[in-house]
Amino acid sequence: MLGILKKKNKQSTNDVENDTVNNSTVNEDVQSKGKSKEQQKIDLKEVNNNDKPLSFPSLVDNMLNDGITFEKDHFKIQTGLGTVKYGRSFFVKPSGYPRTVRIGWLESLFTGDDLDVSVHVDPLERNSAIKRLQDKIDELDAVIDSAARRDNQSKLEDAMQKKDDTKGLQRQIKNNRNGLYYVSVQASVYADDLEELNEKCIDIESMLGGESIEVVNAYGRQRYGFLSTLPLGKNYLSRSDRNLDQLALTAVFPHASSKLNHTGGMPIGRYGNEYVYFNNFDSKLNNYSVGIFGESGAGKGVMVKQLIGRGPMDGINKHVIVDVEPEYRELTRALGGVVIPIVATKDKDANRINPLDIFPEKEVKEKGTPQEYIQEQININEKIKEVLEFFKVMKESCSPGSIGLSPVEIGVLNDTLEILYAEKGVTDDPESIYEQVESVDEEGNIQWERRYIDMPTISDVYERLEALLKDGYGEINELCNVVKLFTRGKAFGIFDGQTRINGQDTASLEGAPVITFDISKLSSNGIERPLAQHVIMTWTWNRFIVGDPKSKKRVILDEAWMMLKYPAMMEFLKLLSARGRKWNTSLTLVSQRYEMFHRSQDSRDVIAQLNTVFFMKQSDEDIEPILETFKFSEEVGEMIRTASVGEVVLKAGKEVVAFVSEPTPDEWEYLNTNQNVDMGKKESMTREEKIEWLEAEVEIEDEGVA
């Protein structure tokens, strides 16, 4: 840049002795003429620092470089004392714009590597635009007349279409609903050597060709192209512009945000050269519920695992996962969590969740004031309603055409549950669900331990119902038959009994950062998996969510589509997604096809509560429901339909961003879900074992070399 400016200055000073001039920039290409050395010294002595006005470097001063040389098709720029960069300027050919443009059609140019891009826009005055469009219409009329006389049908149709488009644009400008502009798009690309520069230019041309964009080298005008891409606000390249209307001009500029406008958060992907930071608990979000949708192989599992693994960065210290595949076992163990397999077996020592367990509900009172405190109580009525929903799911699963529980059945079950909880001594007092148990340690000392009491079970309920049936309550005959199937030893008896987790009580789960319920061994056909999802979600809500209102938590339901055909389950999900904010919890639903959630009003109500939605690649059948629900543009729908593995469109509140989910290399061995990618023995090793394994590999290699 300095070289350019100095060539314009015919009076530049040169050949000044080093001991006379210090810290002065001299252009060696310009020779001073007509002055002796003595005269030059006199001129320089007249420049007194005390007489110079105070100033700060201007924009042009900041752009100065050591020197630049322009060739026909490229230029060399000195960027440091020993550094030279090669560059080439080009522009979008006036006839090389696509027939129609979409938002983001120049995105690949704006996000290119080591590229300077300038878009110059010159508005055309309204009356002048109308007149020029009229001239174009008259010109097209002549073409139409000539084509009609020659019976050139293809040319006639093309000219008539152009005339209609031109007249439509003219009407819009007359009505002040559009405008006409001259637009020029230029760019300069840089590289370390000429070979790399040529390769970059070929890649750019190929990339833009995919958008039907044709670019042309500023051959012989590299100087003007370079100046046009500097922030000088002027287009020095003649014959590089073309007219666009206001709508097409709007699509030129980058509308997608490179990052969410969230306070804090964790990195979840990359947009161009920048990371996208997502805060699931940002104050701008109405609630914290999340939906993640993507067809198999789109990278959905990896995206979810990143949210889990990086959760502590966002202050999320408790994750509960209902794992269907299973996919989350290795990650859970790597993060110091607990994996709980749920298996259909008659073994009394197997893991079991009792759906009738009841826990204290904690609520923050006087929040945000010095008087803030936590109120703790047992809400028996809410628990009974919840268990009634569980029995409703039982009946719906066994009788697909059933409308749920009848009024008589609801009444009988309600009375039965009240009696069973009362017999266990459960009241509104939180201490009523605990008992003091005497024990003797190894030294013979007597100790008292606070232990959770045994709760009613499904067998207890069945025994009461059977007794009522024998006493003449014939209306509950069908209910008795259904509940019997869910008692221990029967087809679906996996949840009948006291809660047992890996041979211990639930206290062992308190400090676990990740808890994964592995239900992959349950039958994928029928009710087993959906019922397990419902029971675990309900139990988790009571055990970890309402009992801890202040800390951040995430509950992940994998393959949520399995619950769609059970209305009672959908009501439960609707309730959880709506209440998540109160309990500082993110309910995260993970599923494949979005269209399945669009079929019924109940599932659409659940989706309406998801303030954050991740969309990865979806099939053609899913795009229209997505556009209808979220009011996305056709361009966004096309991005979702054609997305590559790991590409994500994220809607968080009112913000929509696109990014690429890219785990770090160290994360891959825990996040990989592709069974055809062998992560090797390292996948299940501890850090120490990995070090030993690597050392052994080195020794083997050394022996082989020897």
Image (cartoon, rainbow, N blue to C red):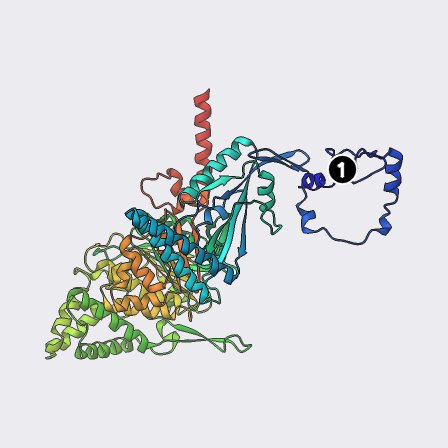
Residue at (26% x, 67% y) in the render: 569
Q: Is residue 453 above or below residue 64?
A: below
Residue 381 point in image, percent of width and height: 31, 78
Query: Quadrant location of the N terminus?
Result: top right
The percent coordinates of residue 51 (x first, y second) are 85, 51
Q: Which residue is mark 1?
A: 26
Callout 1: helix, strand or loop? loop
Q: Give percent across and percent down for residue 679.
A: 37, 39
Residue 109: percent from left, percent from top: 48, 46
Amino acid type of disc 1? Val
Residue at image position (25%, 73%) is 388
Side of 295 relative to 104 (left or right): left
**Residue nearest the viewer, comparing 699 with 365:** 365
- How many badges with numbers are in the image? 1
Residue 218 falls in image quadrant: top right
Q: Nearer the viewer, residue 3 or 695?
A: 3
Question: Residue 22, located in which quarter of the rendered image?
Answer: top right
On screen, 462 above or below 613? below
Task: Give the class, few, some or many, for how many residues have Cα within 10 Å of label 1's Cα (few <14, many ≥20).
Answer: some
Q: Is residue 589 visible?
A: yes
Which residue, as the protein is rendered here, is positioned at the far top?
A: 706
Q: Does residue 542 appear in this view?
A: no
User: Taking 467 as reference, is 613 left or right?
Assistant: right
Nearest the viewer among 37 and 367 is 37
- Near-viewer residue (580 or 451): 580
